[in-house]
Image (tube, grey):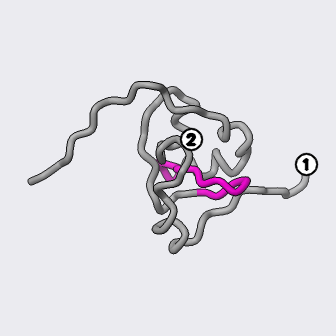
Amino acid sequence: MGSFNPAELALPHQVISTYDKAENKGYCMVELTRKELLKGNPAFTIEYKDKLFGIGKANNIRHFLRNPAAYELSKLQDKLPVEFDKKG
């Protein structure tokens, strides 16, 4: 195996301006393969094949970068939990 790695971390200015365009509404691609819902952290956004993928935990960046093809087809479930605004 070579050192080919098609995924790269998005630059901070790219994250801020394009995070709302992340696949699966920004949910963590690695956690979706584990049947878990975790919102991605904009700081951990990864660009792969001209798409943005949310990653929820720093440790999951390593998993995604090892084999991005294993995660790119993960899909968000049809029904999501209700989210409430957290106002003080």
Q: Quadrant of residue 52?
A: bottom right
Q: How many marks?
A: 2
Q: Is residue 65 left or right of residue 5?
A: left
Foreground of the two, 23 or 59: 23
Nearer-N-terminus badge (1/2)? 1
Q: Residue at x 40, y 25 (%)?
A: 79
Task: Report the magenta residues as a range.
Answer: 46-58
Closest to the camera, between mark 1 and mark 2, is 2
Above or below residue 10? Residue 30 is above
* Residue farthest along the right direction in this orientation: 1
Q: Are marks 1 and 2 in contact (CB under 8 Å)?
A: no
Q: Which mark is residue 29?
A: 2
**Depicted 51 relative to depicted 31: above or below:** below
At a point 78% along the width and 56% down the height, the residue shown is 5
Task: Work out which residue is located at the far bottom of the displayed protein and give it.
Answer: 13
Q: Position of 2 compared to 25: left or right?
A: right
Secondary element type, mark 1: loop
- Which numbered marker is on residue 1? 1
Residue 47 falls in which quadrant of the image? bottom right
Residue at the location (46% across, 49% down)?
40
SS label for mark 2 = helix
Q: As rendered, which of 42 and 1 lies closer to the eye?
A: 42
Q: Amino acid at mark 2?
A: Met
Magenta span has 3?
A: no
Question: In whole angstroms, how far apart are the C-alphas of marks 1 and 2?
Answer: 24 Å
The spot of residue 27 in percent (x, y) is: 47, 43
Foreground residue among 79 and 5: 79
- Residue type indicated by callout 1: Met
